[in-house]
Amino acid sequence: MNVAVIGATGNAGRPIARLLLDDPSVEVNACARSEAALADLESTIGPSPGMLRTTVADVARSDDMLRVFGSADLVVGATSRSQHGMTLAELAVETGVSYLGLYLSEPAKWDRLRTLHTRCVERGVMVVDDGGWHPGVPAAMVRAAAEHGALSEAWVGASFGLRWDEIGVASETIDDFLTELEATDPSVWVEGGWVRGFRHARHFDFGVGEEPVSCIPMCLEEMRELAGSGTLDSTGFFMAGFGPALDYAVLPLSMGVAKVKRSWGAGLLWWGLRHFGSSDDIGVLVLDGRRAESGEAVRMRVWHADAYALTAIPAVATIRQMWSNPRPGVWTQASFVDPGHFFEQLREMGVNVEA
Ligand SMILES: NC(=O)c1ccc[n+]([C@@H]2O[C@H](COP(=O)([O-])OP(=O)(O)OC[C@H]3O[C@@H](n4cnc5c(N)ncnc54)[C@H](OP(=O)(O)O)[C@@H]3O)[C@@H](O)[C@H]2O)c1
């Protein structure tokens, strides 16, 4: 099995490559634009049962991409730009090679991706996007909990901390992060209808600090799918903030400055994250739900002490399900995976799953 990881030298791509290499039947083709970063990856990734090779390749160069897809059984897109997701998905259909993307959950992207579904089914290709942990895991938690009895209500909150001053992130990734903040759709599904607005914020007890944390609604495609499935009266996804200095000063200012000059806004956001962002490294997801029949409360908590490991592990679990249980078509990660098995895989790879 040859898996090409495009963006393999990045914060998400590197642990994905590392985990894939635990399987002796896997050859990872690590791809990125910088030859130096690929050489560093090769010298630091450590010995592994699988085989690693590297390729200098740029998503913007179609020759590079055709070469990468031509030698792959599956391609992972973990580059900094969410626009790459569509390019890679179209290449997947064209070349007949299945694909998993870790890109932002955007309605416009999903409108375009869904037009590929019929061709994917005809060609036996899987195009899975919204991979990682958020998007990627929240709706899978709801689906896993619902396997033990239908839910009437399911709210999922996420909180993460990164040692921003210790990690290097490409300027394009920060720009994409700014886009995610600007494009936040604060919609939630309440009693069978959509409501919209930051006033629908909810508190979640992440089991980290002493107090429950107020989180803002952030609609993801996987939650839209759940809302439309007819099994839940109310559902939504919510994100914790970064602390008062970032939430009330740096973030709004960055968005304002970005309207004048994009790179200044992204630069200000990066400066703010490094100066006022968390100093803890952790990723936590909490599901607060209710059983339809009994009204019994349901809680599930999924966490890892390394937010990027929590990005990589669900992606690798999905890749393993893509080859053990192929289902051609266009999918969100959360709707593609078998949820029960998915959380078993996450546990095996070191994620704390408390249900
Ligand atoms: N769903 C989730 O839970 C989740 C969580 C975290 C991140 N993400 C997503 O994952 C992606 C990566 O994030 P990150 O934090 O790992 O970013 P990062 O650390 O900045 O890494 C970006 C990687 O992409 C490569 N790259 C950038 N442009 C490229 C191009 N044109 N062609 C080929 N390679 C290119 C970079 O290497 P070169 O510069 O050398 O090319 C690097 O390897 C982002 O889209 C982010 O939104 C998703």
Image: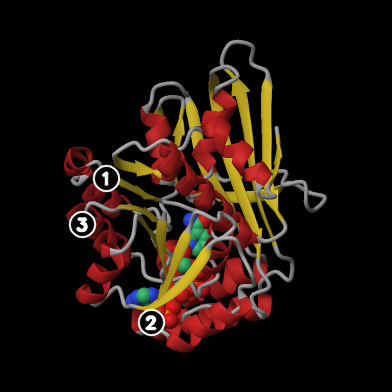
Disc 2 within 8 angstroms of ligand 1 (CB): yes
Can residue 217 be seen in this snapshot? yes
Whether label 2 touches label 1, CB < 8 Å: no
SS state under label 3:
helix
* Real-space CA distance between mark 1 and mark 3, rounded to the nearest whole angstrom: 9 Å
Amino acid type of the residue that numbered disc 2 sits on in the rendered structure: Arg
Marked residue nearer the N-terminal end (1 or 3)? 3
Mark 3: which amino acid? Thr
Disc 1 marks a residue whose amino acid type is Val
In the image, residue 72 sits, relative to residue 65, either above or below, namely above
The residue shown at (68%, 48%) is: 351
The disc at residue 95 is: 3
Residue at image point 46% right, 41% down: 321
Image position, residue 278 (x, y; %)? 70, 69
**3D distance between C-alphas at marks 2 and 1:** 26 Å
279 over 222 or under it: above or below = below
Which of the two residues, 205 or 65, is positioned nearer the viewer here? 65
List the residue tagged with mark 1: 125
Q: Position of residue 220 (x, y in %)?
A: 43, 46
What residue would you read off at disc 2? 33
